Image: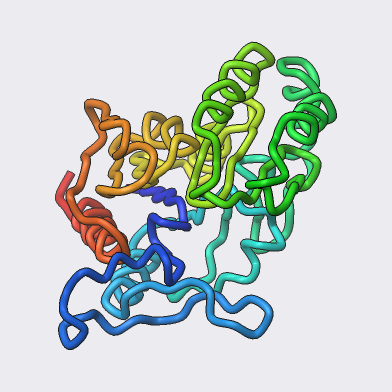
């Protein structure tokens, strides 16, 4: 039986120092492995136990890193285990096959975006015009597919985020607040569509998924079984679904628990 495991990365399997949530006494903290360096500084981590679990998972299933990161941002990550045959980047806008972008898939995505939602330029203009410079630190566009802001979360207007979500909804876009980033993403740009394509190519009999944010909800619903941690947008909204298990763990230990659950399911008799 062929099993495809698609997992979000940031705050699901890998964690910045600010997101580790190490609440135990220092002497009992887990050993950490750095899996991303940016501008010569360590940026993302997982526990050493999680690293071994991911290596084992990659040996027994088709593991597909699935991220809203751009291809360039994804390629900074050095995950343990076998090199993935497939990776999903830019929230489904790109499928990498042995590290190279699949041009046909990307062309299909662009055609859907042109047909089904307002153009990126309109959304970008709205963000530039309405976001308050007091709390905006950066305006960014991800590979000409979606836009996001880097903000000072303590100063951010929650009412503005709600108003943006309504405005975007009417134009075929969705809004997600993750840490210090506010994403505006076209609704047709989904991780789930890319997962279905990878599963089709792999001839998968079983698909598993994990994720923590609003942008992962469609991924979890598309899989046969899914898991989410006890932190993140989905946990904050108490979101779940019949085939999705909500785990209590938060922070880097949630990543370890998710990998245990994925590996246990892959190894279970079917």
Residue at (50% x, 37% y) in the render:
215
The quadrant in which residue 77 appears is bottom right
Residue at (54% x, 35% y) in the render:
157
| Label total for image | 0
Compared across the picture, whether 159 is left or right of 206 comes to right
Residue at (21% x, 54% y) in the render:
261
Give 109 or 160, whichever is nearer the viewer: 160
Compared across the picture, whether 229 is left or right of 19 comes to left
The quadrant in which residue 198 appears is top right
The image shows residue 114 at horizontal and vertical percentages of 80, 21
Above or below 114: residue 5: below
Where is the C terminus found, in terms of image quarters? top left
For this orientation, the residue located farthest to the top is 170
The image shows residue 112 at horizontal and vertical percentages of 73, 22
The image shows residue 140 at horizontal and vertical percentages of 75, 48
Q: Is residue 196 visible?
A: no
Above or below 144: residue 56: below
For this orientation, the residue located farthest to the bottom is 27
The image shows residue 226 at horizontal and vertical percentages of 30, 40
Residue at (73% x, 53% y) in the render:
101
Above or below 157: residue 155: below
Q: Is residue 22 visible?
A: yes
């Amino acid at each position: 039986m062929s099993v495809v495991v698609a997992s979000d990365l940031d705050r699901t399997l890998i964690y910045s120092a600010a997101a580790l949530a190490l609440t135990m006494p220092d002497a009992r903290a887990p050993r950490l492995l750095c899996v991303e360096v940016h501008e010569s500084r360590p940026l993302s981590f997982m526990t050493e136990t999680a690293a071994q679990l991911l290596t084992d998972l990659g040996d027994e299933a088709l593991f597909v890193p699935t991220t809203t990161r751009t291809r360039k941002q994804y390629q900074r990550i050095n995950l343990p285990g076998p090199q993935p045959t497939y990776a999903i980047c830019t929230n489904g806008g790109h499928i990498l096959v042995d590290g190279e972008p699949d041009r046909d898939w990307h062309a299909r995505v662009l055609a859907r975006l042109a047909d089904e939602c307002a153009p990126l330029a309109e959304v970008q203009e709205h963000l530039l015009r309405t976001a308050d410079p007091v709390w905006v630190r950066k305006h960014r566009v991800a590979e000409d597919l979606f836009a996001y802001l880097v903000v000072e979360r303590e100063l951010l207007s929650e009412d503005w985020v709600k108003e943006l979500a309504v405005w975007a909804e009417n134009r075929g876009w969705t809004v997600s607040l993750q840490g210090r980033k506010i994403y505006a993403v076209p609704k047709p740009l989904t991780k789930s569509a890319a997962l279905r394509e990878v599963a089709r190519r792999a001839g998968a009999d079983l698909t598993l998924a994990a994720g923590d944010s609003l942008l992962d909800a469609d991924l979890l619903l598309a899989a046969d079984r899914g898991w989410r941690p006890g932190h993140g947008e989905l946990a904050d909204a108490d979101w779940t679904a019949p085939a999705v298990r909500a785990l209590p763990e938060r922070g880097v230990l949630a990543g370890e628990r998710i990998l245990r659950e994925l590996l246990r399911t892959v190894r279970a008799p079917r």
